[in-house]
Amino acid sequence: MEGGAAVSTEKQNESTPSYTYWVRQTTQDAAPLPLPKKLTSDDLNNQANNTQTHLGSAWNRAGTWEEKNLNKWANERIKELLISVGSLEYSGGRAEVAEVTRCSGDAFLVTVRNKKRVGYTYELTIKVKGEWLVGDEKKVIKGHIDIPEFSFGEIDDLQIEVSLSEDKDLGQEDKHRIKQDMKQFLQPFQEKLLKFEQELKEL
């Protein structure tokens, strides 16, 4: 019995591969480790070209969909452009842009399939002040120009609404004349907002 047990144990040891042998066998069958490759000048040029043609964030290499909020830049830029209009001279006086009191809306940049699209929607109120000859004296008059909601591509059809802040001492004829004068800000406002659109497209 003792001899038989010894033979059985010996056969079992011979038929069962050891752990060391199993590791050696697996290592021989495994894929070889990658070898480092020096980049050629062509490889570097290809990488540079891919970087230049890709739009959007680095994580969105496929360019499927990405939207970027441009509100901060757009709000500041619209105010700067409208204030830069300065003053207008009329036959009976002059007026200037004092402040953009309301600049409400959104501007955005969307990248879809590696193509860039921009858009915006805004409502504006601009404070205007000036001097007009009323009767025999010059009077300081303040007013507001409201620009109702408008979007990208609608500048040519822009509408404005004028209201006077203090008109108690003005006759109807003077009110109408001063409002018509203030409406002449429409064209320079359109020119500035078209410039804003162009700059937005170039971002």
Image: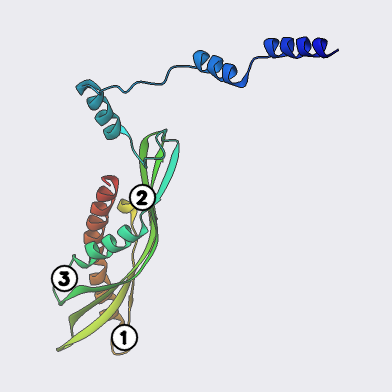
Q: Position of residue 6 (x, y in %)?
A: 77, 13
Q: Position of residue 172 (x, y in %)?
A: 31, 81
Residue 193 vs 101, above or below: the answer is: above
Callout 1: 10 Å neighbours few (<14), some, many (20+)? few
Residue sitting at x 57%, y 20%:
20
The Cα atoms of the two marked residues, 1 and 3, are separated by 20 Å
For this view, does 57 lie left or right of residue 40?
Answer: right
Residue 127 vs 17, above or below: the answer is: below
User: Is mark 3 in CB contact (under 8 Å) with mark 2?
Assistant: no
Callout 3: 10 Å neighbours few (<14), some, many (20+)? some
Q: Nearer the viewer, residue 33 or 158?
A: 33
| Residue type of the residue flagged with mark 2 | Phe
Residue sitting at x 32%, y 82%:
165
- Which badge, 1 or 3, comes first in the chain's sequence? 3
Most distant residue in the right direction: 1
Residue sitting at x 23%, y 57%:
192
For this view, does 137 lie left or right of residue 56?
Answer: left
| Residue type of the residue flagged with mark 3 | Ser
